[in-house]
Image (tube, coloured by chain):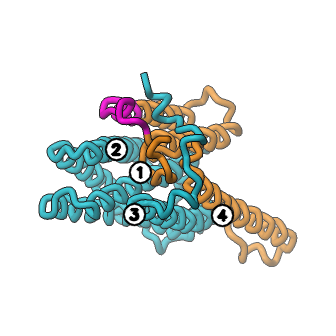
Amino acid sequence: MTDTRWDVAPGDRPALPASERSMSSGVLVYTIGLLLAAILTATSFWVANTSAIWAPGVPAGLAVLAIAQMGVHLVFFLHITTGPDSTHNVLALAFGVLIVFLVLAGSLVIMANLNENMMAHGEMMNLQMQR
Amino acid sequence: MNVLVEVDAVSKAELLDVSEAGPAPKRIIAGFGFWIFLLSDIVMFSALFASYAVLAKATAGGPTGAQLFDLRNAAMETAFLLLSSYSCGLMSLAVESRHRFGIFFGAVVTFLLGAAFLNLELREFQDMIAAGASPQRSAFLSAFFTLVGCHGLHVAIGLAWLVLMMIQLSMRGFQQVVVRRLHCFSLFWHALDIIWVLIFTIVYLMGVLP
C-alpha cells in the first residue's frame, strides 16, 4: 500500500514514489507541452494564411487544431489524466465541457434557425441581422 | 525515461476506498474547489463566445474583422501568453521543491510576459477605437470588445494576484496557505491560456478568413 489515498488536486502531477519523481522530469513534461502547443499554434496560423488547403475546409481544420491544443494544455500543463486518482477532476471537466457545448451549439442553432425563418418575410428584412 | 509515468497514473490497487481514507487534505479540497470555479468561469466565457459567434457578421456597415485584425499582433500575443504559461509551470515546480530563487525568477518572467501580452492587447484596442471601430459602432464590435476585453481583465487580475503572492511569499514564507494559493494561481494562469487558444482561433484566425 502506498500513501496515495485521495484524488490528486487538479494541476498536481500524479503522485509517484519519491524515487521516480524528480525536478528534471517535471521540466521535461512542461517542455514537451510547450513544444507541442507551439507546433499546433504555428500550424493554426499557417492554415489560416495558406492557399494550399481547400478553403471551405479551413474552419474545420482550425477547430480541430484548437481542440488538440486545449488537450495538450490540459494534459501537460494542468496534468489532467485518465488515472483513477483524477476521476473527480475529469468528471467536473466533462460536465463543464457539456455545458459549454450546450451553450455554444444551442445559441448557434437557435439563432441560425431564427435568421432562416425571418428571411421569408421581405418586409422584415431590415430587422434582421445584416449578413 | 519516466515521462510516461508522469503523464500516466497510479494503478487502481494503490487507492484506498473513500470511506477508509477519510477526508482529503486541504490542498486537494482547495485545488478541487478552485477547479470548479475555473470551470464556471469557462462556462461564462462560453456565453460570451456564443454571443460573439452569433454577432460576428453583424457589422452594421462598419469595419469587419478581416479589415481590423492584425494576425502578426495576435501571433505575438499568443507567443507571450504561451511562454508565460510555461514559465508559470516551471514556477510551480520550484514551489514543489521549495526553491525560493526559482519561484521569484519564474514569477518575474511570468509577470513580464503577461504584462507584454496586456500591453499589446491594450494598444490594439486603442488603435481600433482611434480608427472608429469602438464598441458602440456595431454589434460585432460590442461582442468583440466584451469577449477579448473580459479575457484581458482576467489577465490583469492574474498579474495583480501574482504580485500579491510574491509579497505573501516573501513575508510569510512557505506556509501551507501560501503554497495552496500559489497552486491556485498556476491553475488560473493555465486556464487563461486555454481560453486564449479559443480566442485566437475563433476571433482572429476565423475572423480574417475570406
Whole-number angstrom distance, CA of label 2 to CA of label 4: 28 Å
Q: Is residue B35 visible?
A: yes
Which circle's residue, 3 or 2, is located before the other in the chain? 3
Relative depth, front residue between A107 and B63: A107
**Residue A30 x/y as whole percent:** 39, 36
Dot 1 crowding, Cα within 10 Å, few <14, some 14–19, many 20+: many
Residue shown at 39%/63% (left/top)?
B26
- Direction top: furthest residue: B1
**Residue B79 x/y as whole percent:** 37, 41
Say whether marks 2 and 1 touch (CB < 8 Å). Answer: yes
Q: Amino acid at mark 3?
A: Lys
Same chain check for tags 2 and 4: no
Q: Amino acid at mark 4?
A: Ile
Dot 4 crowding, Cα within 10 Å, few <14, some 14–19, many 20+: some
Q: Which element type, helix, strand or loop, lies under badge 2? A: helix
Q: Which residue is mark 4?
A: A99
Q: Colour of chain A?
A: orange
- Direction left: furthest residue: B171
Q: Which residue is mark 2?
A: B89
Relative depth, front residue between B203 and A102: A102
Same chain check for tags 4 and 1: no
Same chain check for tags 3 and 2: yes
Q: Which residue is mark 1?
A: B190
Between tags 3 and 2, which lies in front?
3
**Chain that appears cyan:** B
- The magenta segment is A16-31
Which circle's residue, 3 or 1, is located before the other in the chain? 3
Say whether marks 3 and 4 touch (CB < 8 Å). Answer: no
